[in-house]
């Protein structure tokens, strides 16, 4: 049986003000708990800034990954730990989190015991480790969204798609990301407008400016391709 495992590393998390970092961690945990309820996703946060998720429905992995990235970018985290962390904090505000989707077998998966072992998590985890910027003062980010499997054709097919999605979301505003993750998780524009106390045309305006229709098409293409 094939699984999709998402590994994630919050970029420049050590540059965030301590109080606001605590808010980020608690809000992210709450968000991941909701993914468990809605999509049966097993998630855990390690050392406050590393995320692992097992997505049982492989076709939903890209949607879940984009929702996590948009959620983190939507949070009102505005304060760096100190003045010397200003440039690293700017990287956090731009990119939010680096995510890898590993697609393959899991030799062991026990949610109750917290055991995840096998090809899928090895692929995603290795890429995150190789691209980590934890100990670097000057952060150079090439891409923050990657798909990995042992199928080279599948990898090549998804690579340009994820590069374009990455570029789009990295340029998005906090409000655009907020609306995007809510739409990714199935909320209508009317529901979002009610939740955020704004009008539906404003929701649509932000959605259009982001290019959400293209994001939705990409998510549908991924789901169709990975499950065919």
Image (tube, grey):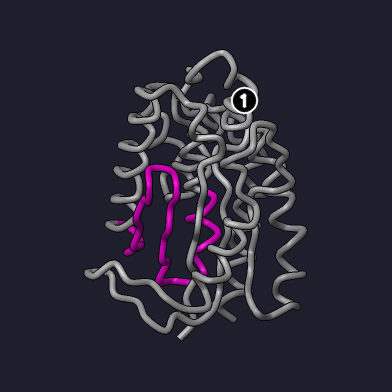
Number of labelled discs?
Answer: 1
> In the image, what residue occupies the spot 59% across and 59% down?
219
Query: What is the x, y in percent for residue 77?
Result: 46, 24
Q: Which residue is at the far top? A: 83
> In the image, what residue occupies the spot 47% across and 26% down?
16
Quarter placement of the C terminus: bottom right
Is disc 1 surrounded by few (<14), some (14 to 19) or many (20+) residues within 10 Å? some
Query: What is the x, y in percent for residue 12?
Result: 55, 35
Relative depth, front residue between 155 and 37: 155
- For label 1, the residue is 90
Camera sees residue 209: no
> In the image, what residue occupies the spot 55% across and 43% down?
97
Asked which quadrant contains residue 137, the reply is top right
Q: What stretch is highlighted in magenta?
A: 38-66
Query: What is the x, y in percent for residue 82?
Result: 51, 16
Query: Is residue 31 rendered to the left or right of residue 85?
Result: left
Q: Which residue is at the far front? A: 135
Relative depth, front residue between 194 and 28: 28
- Disc 1, SS: helix
Q: Is residue 136 magenta?
A: no
Q: Is residue 125 above or below residue 97?
A: below
């Amino acid at each position: 049986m094939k699984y999709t495992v998402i590994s994630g590393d919050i970029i420049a998390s050590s540059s965030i003000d301590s109080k606001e970092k605590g808010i980020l961690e608690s809000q992210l945990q709450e968000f991941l708990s909701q993914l468990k309820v809605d999509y049966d996703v097993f998630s855990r946060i390690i050392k406050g800034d590393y995320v692992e998720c097992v997505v049982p429905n492989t076709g939903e992995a890209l949607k879940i990954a984009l929702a996590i990235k948009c959620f983190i970018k939507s949070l009102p985290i505005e304060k760096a730990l100190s003045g010397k962390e200003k440039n690293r904090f700017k990287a956090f505000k731009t990119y939010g989190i680096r995510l890898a989707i590993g697609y393959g077998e899991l030799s062991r998966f026990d949610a109750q015991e917290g055991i995840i072992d096998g090809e899928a998590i090895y692929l995603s985890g290795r890429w995150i480790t190789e691209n980590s910027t934890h100990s670097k003062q000057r952060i150079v980010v090439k891409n923050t969204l990657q798909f990995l499997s042992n199928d080279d054709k599948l990898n090549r097919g998804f690579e340009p798609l994820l590069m374009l999605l990455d570029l789009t979301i990295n340029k998005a505003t906090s409000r655009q990301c907020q609306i995007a993750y809510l739409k990714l998780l199935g909320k209508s524009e009317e529901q979002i407008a009610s939740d955020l106390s704004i009008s539906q045309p404003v929701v649509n305006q932000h959605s259009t400016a982001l290019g959400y229709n293209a994001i939705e098409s990409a998510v549908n293409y991924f789901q169709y391709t990975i499950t065919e």
